[in-house]
Image (tube, rainbow, N blue to C red):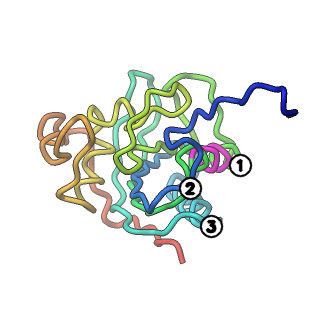
Amino acid sequence: MTASDPPQPDRTPTGGHMLSRQRTVLSLGSNLGDRLDNLQEAIDALFDAPGLTFVALSPVYETAPWGGIEQPDFLNVVVMAETRIPPETLLERVLSIEDAMRRERVIHWGPRTLDIDIVTFGDVVSDDPDLTLPHPHAHERAFVLVPWADIDPGAVLPGRGAVADLVAAVGTADVTLRGELILQPPA
């Protein structure tokens, strides 16, 4: 870029600046292959690189697929972390992990080896089409809300309200605790 080139827009919700410490909530799911191993590998990968500090990991839940596509049930967890990296940098990490685990994006809401969604990033609200925050469907998804409420009973989904109230609204019929399935927090 030369001095005469116009400045490039910064599309990050934070203007591309290093953030103060932010709490982020991530939802992970898998319904292809060794689902539990896929989740463990993803958790390990998320925290292998610098920038994320582990806070909490929910129990494992088995859930019916969301979106009306016939497919196997998912295993789902929610991870909470703290970070100073911008949300778009976290998104790049998430997409890289999904790609490394051979996630294929063939059918919208279709089966996948791994799905990682950034549910919230502090109080950041963004309608950027590449990273909408908070996640636009989180308030409708028991597979996000139930495990999140387990690790943070007082959680609030910005713009939607208390997670516990959202759980009551969506119900828990399609979410089954799998207490015998154990994931290890990152080392």
Disc 3 vs disc 2: Cβ atoms closer than 8 Å? no
Residue placed farthest to the right in the image?
2
Q: Which residue is mark 3?
A: 50
Disc 3 vs disc 1: Cβ atoms closer than 8 Å? no
Disc 3 marks a residue whose amino acid type is: Pro
Q: Residue at x 46, y 49 (%)?
A: 28
Count numbered badges in the picture: 3
Residue placed farthest to the bottom in the image?
187
Disc 2 element: loop
Q: Which residue is mark 1?
A: 100
Q: CA distance from mark 3 to mark 2?
A: 14 Å
Q: Earlier in the sequence, mark 3 or mark 2?
A: 2
- Residue 96 is a magenta residue: yes
Please determine whether, in this image, residue 98 is positioned above or below residue 132: below
Please determine whether, in this image, residue 159 is positioned above or below residue 77: above
Q: Which residue is mark 2?
A: 18
